[in-house]
Amino acid sequence: MQQSAVLPVFSPFPVRFVRGEGVYLFDENNRKYLDFGSGVAVNALGHCHPALLKALTEQGSKLWHCSNWYQITNQEQLAKTITDNSFADVVFLCNSGTEAIECTIKMVRAYFSAQQQPQRHRIITFHNAFHGRTFGAMAATGRGGFEPGLPGFDHVAYNDLEALKAAITPATAAVLIEPVQGEGGAIPATLEYLQAVRSLCDQHGILMCLDEIQTGIGRTGKLFAYEWAGIAPDILASAKGIGGGFPLGACLATHKAASGLTKGMHGSTFGGNPLASAVGQTVLHEILQPGFLQQVDTVARYLWQQLLRLLKTYPQVFSDARGAGLLLALKCTANNRTVAEALLEKGLLVIPAGDNVIRLIPPLIITHHDVDQAIHLLTEYATTVSVKEHSLA
């Protein structure tokens, strides 16, 4: 077999998809798979959504790219839609979640530098987090392997208020937290903890930054997860679902938090180009339709109840269920990669993550019927494992 020319930094499953439709993907042999991975929380509206196809086709026939040296109507419209429906006053559009995090980090440091407090440059982040793969994002995550790393980050235990309090010093500029640690294993912060973080930030005059790259754009049943806690951050990084599969990211901020980033201090060649912005605007238009987010919440609660039943029935296969909205996970007793491969064989796509879980992060358009199908396939797998273990006993 000829060796791939792709840099071998991925470990793909043995399947090649050639088309998608709604909540399904189809391989080279036209076999259908129920997609409960949605490109790692990206395909918010499923595959080949008619509205997205129309937006791509119409904008693609007019103008793809013209750079930010010029005013871009689609970009301005998308930014206004975001600010009209969030805490933010301004938005920087980019191409990915990692870029949104980089903008967040720069914005924090620029804010305190403009306040004549350059000594306040450290950002508190959390163990088990994931913020991306650039040097800044890796430093925020606490990931090594490319030393020396970028300094300026302090890592503390997640959901531990006393650890957070102890980490705050005169050099602290911000706290950066995921409402749900997606790559870390779909571990949610409690609403009370998020409220306490907001209070601590206010008390110490530091910025509260949210990484809603996985939880944002409707995944928890609200446009952004912070809404469940009744708080508002100062800065928020978003991506994944915002483009519905098209590369797009956004850094949202208040006027105050963004005040340090002035002309020439940040930018992007491709960010917010006409094609990406047209797609992002269409995604938000669909998600903000009356009843859409309520339906996401309803189906998510139904999926959660079914996972709890599965957990109770097969404790020897799944040891825990966790998450929020349609970012849920089952902790496996066997290796999670092996479990994901077995489910792939049955026609169900899930995504492994930290703490040996498989994530269920389907398109936001799933129905109760789709949930029933997924639970049926999970049950088939769990039953097969249980029967094998019983026969070996």
Image (cartoon, rainbow, N blue to C red):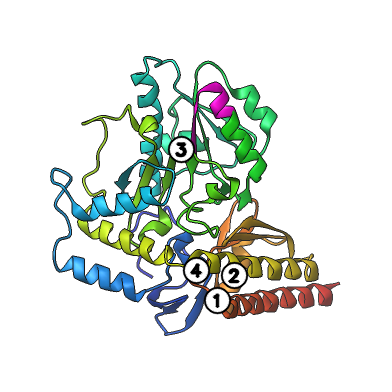
Q: Quadrant of residue 30?
A: bottom left
Q: At which x and y percent is residue 283?
A: 36, 63
Q: Using the rendered image of the protein, determine whether residue 98 is visible from the camera's viewpoint.
A: yes
Q: Position of residue 370 (x, y in %)?
A: 56, 78
- Which amino acid, by three-letter code, is at mark 1? Thr
**Mark closest to the chain's N terminus, 2 or 1:** 2
Segment colored magenta: 200-209
Q: Earlier in the sequence, mark 2 or mark 3?
A: 3
Circle 2 is placed at which residue position? 299
Q: Residues within 10 Å of mark 1 (few under 14, many from 20)?
A: some
Residue 367 has which mark? 1
The first of marks 1 and 3 along the sequence is: 3
C-alpha distance separating marks 1 and 3: 36 Å
* 3 vs 4, front mark: 4
Q: Which residue is mark 3?
A: 138
Residue at the image position 26 percent from the left and 54 percent from the top: 77
Mark 2 or 3, which is nearer the eye?
2
Q: Is residue 26 magenta?
A: no
Marks 2,1: beta carbons within 8 A? yes
Circle 2: residue type: Val
For label 3, the crowd category at 10 Å Cα-Cα, with few meaning under 14, some 14 to 19 and many 20 or more, is many
- Spatial CA span between label 4 and label 1: 14 Å
Q: What kind of residue is marked 4?
A: Gly
Mark 3: which amino acid? Answer: Met
- Give SS at disc 2: helix
Measured along the vertical axis of the image, is residue 23 above or below residue 312? below
Q: CA distance from mark 2 to mark 3?
A: 34 Å
Identify the residue under disc 4: 291
Let me know if residue 143 appears in the view: no
